[in-house]
């Protein structure tokens, strides 16, 4: 048995949740916040048999898309920075961050 933890952008959470339900994969869905852009994410915890891990990873890959968006860097108190330091910059966001861990014991009460 494996524990798959998938962190996806909120924009992809509904489509991932729907795809997991269609594939008869149980998941716990939790709201989370990203550290870099402080934007909304959703974390899915999925307990799954070893032989179904590739199927789950494919579902996550198919429903989680990277995007480009503009962000404004945090204002700095350092006066030596150029005036362009606070200009918006384009960054890539989204996709999925996935961890697969071994589960030694599993209980369902």
Image: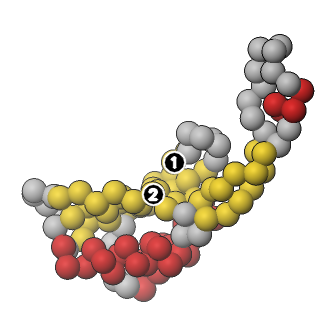
Q: Is residue 6 left or right of residue 1?
A: right
Residue 59 against residue 103 in the figure, above or below: below
Mark 2, mark 1: which one is toward the viewer? 2
Residue 81 against residue 53 in the figure, above or below: above
Q: Image quarter for residue 22?
A: bottom left
Residue 10 drawn at (x, y percent):
60, 60
Tell me what residue is drawn at x 81 percent, y 21 percent.
Answer: 81
Helix, strand or loop for disc 2 = strand
- The quadrant of the image that shows the C terminus is bottom left
Tell me what residue is drawn at x 63 percent, y 56 percent.
Answer: 93
Tell me what residue is drawn at x 61 percent, y 50 percent.
Answer: 40
**Residue bearing the label numbered 2:** 97
- Is residue 32 among the parts visible in the rendering? yes
Residue 83 drawn at (x, y percent):
89, 27
**Residue bearing the label numbered 1:** 32
- The quadrant of the image that shows the N terminus is bottom left
Q: Is residue 25 left or right of residue 30?
A: left
Q: Nearer the viewer, residue 72 or 43?
A: 72
In three-dimensional space, the C-alpha distance between marks 2 and 1, rounded to whole angstroms, equals 13 Å
Among numbered discs 2 and 1, the one appearing first in the sequence: 1
Residue furthest to the bottom in view is 22
């Amino acid at each position: 048995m494996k524990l798959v933890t998938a962190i996806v952008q909120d924009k992809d959470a509904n489509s991932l949740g729907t795809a997991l339900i269609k594939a008869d994969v149980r998941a716990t869905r939790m709201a989370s916040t990203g550290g870099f852009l402080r934007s909304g994410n959703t974390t899915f915890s999925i307990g799954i048999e070893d032989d179904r891990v590739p199927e789950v990873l494919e579902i996550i890959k198919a429903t989680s898309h990277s995007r480009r968006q503009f962000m404004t860097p945090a204002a700095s108190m350092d006066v030596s920075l150029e005036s362009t330091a606070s200009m918006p910059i384009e960054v890539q966001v989204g996709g999925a961050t996935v961890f697969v861990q071994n589960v030694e014991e599993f209980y369902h009460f």
